[in-house]
Image: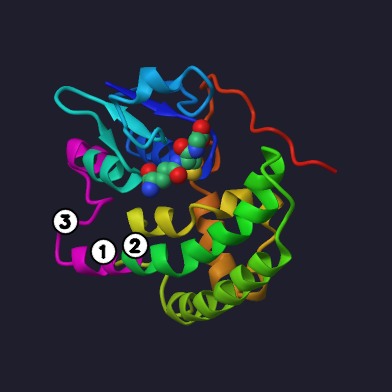
Amino acid sequence: MKMYFSRNPNPRLAVAVARYLNAEVDFEFASPRAPDQGSRYLSLNPNLLLPILERPGKPLWEAYAIACWFSRDAGSNFWRTDDDEPEMIRWISWGKENFVKACDMVHWERGTKQRYGIGPCDQAMVEEGLRQFHVAARILEAELSARTWLVGNSVSFADFRMGTFLPFNDAARLPIDDYPSLRRWYGQLEDIGAWQNPFDGLSAPDLPPLPD
Ligand SMILES: N[C@@H](CCC(=O)N[C@@H](CS)C(=O)NCC(=O)O)C(=O)O
């Protein structure tokens, strides 16, 4: 089995899940949208995006699906399959439309666009992203002030997913320190080796640097 990845947020998430669960998988850096690479990856993922898991049968794409697969394969409850499953689904669904989306908006302008020379930072989009970030962060802050992790008493895919863009906060500069419980929760994620250093020992070029 092989997972194609890059150091960008969604593949980073999938690599972190695989390593957290000690999945038996090889990792290969890929760049499916690079000129002349498309034909190699089109049959693996018609979106030409990462992560992609090449496995017996059909390849799997989308970070959620890959995380679910690794968790099932490991016989783990990291992807909840017990009575907490609805709560986990609630957080990943809400996160995609709210907290993660807001982080993504700001990171896209301040991070990805700048690294890859896609265009100038759109300040109106940053402001809208920050507005949405504060709305969502207030909801998470209230939740996390009363609990250690988002679901039950241990880390789950909901926590990894909610944190997808926070390792890139050197670029996005989201004000997570304004929210003490959110900051404490993210510190717990940072204490997990697979989360903090998912690419340890893997061969992959660094992301292009942010311009000064
Ligand atoms: N919904 C997809 C999004 C995948 C995605 O947007 N991947 C981006 C990185 S965040 C990508 O492949 N970019 C090209 C690259 O990293 O080479 C998922 O969750 O897997």
Q: Is residue 10 visible?
A: no
The residue at the point 20 percent across, 63 percent down is 85
Quadrant position of the C terminus in the picture: top right
The first of marks 2 and 3 along the sequence is: 3
* Residues in magenta, as a range: 70-91
Q: Is residue 80 above or below residue 54?
A: below
Give the amino acid type for the residue marked by disc 3 in the picture: Thr
The crowd level at tag 1 (other Cα within 10 Å; few <14, some 14-19, many 20+) is some
Q: Give the left or right position of residue 43, taking residue 35 as reference.
A: left
The residue at the point 28 percent across, 24 percent down is 43
Q: Give the left or right position of residue 208, taking residue 23 as reference.
A: right
Q: Which mark is residue 127?
A: none
Q: Is residue 100 visible?
A: yes
**Where residue 6 appears, x then y in whole percent?**
50, 31
Q: Give the left or right position of residue 13, taking residue 79 as reference.
A: right
Picture quarter with ligand 1: top left
Quadrant position of the N terminus in the picture: top left
Callout 2 secondary element = helix
User: Label 3: which residue?
Assistant: 81
Instruction: Tell me which colouring the rendered structure shows.
Output: rainbow
**Where residue 33 appears, x then y in whole percent?**
49, 29
Give the amino acid type for the residue marked by disc 2 in the picture: Ile
User: Label 2: which residue?
Assistant: 92
Q: Which mark is residue 89?
A: 1
Give the amino acid type for the residue marked by disc 1 in the picture: Ile
Task: Confirm whether the magenta stretch covers residue 47.
Answer: no
Task: Confirm whether the magenta stretch covers residue 90.
Answer: yes
Label 1 to label 3: alpha-carbon separation: 10 Å
Labels 1, 3: front one: 1
- Looking at this rendering, what residue extends furthest in the right direction? 212
Callout 3 secondary element = loop
The residue at the point 41 percent across, 36 percent down is 49
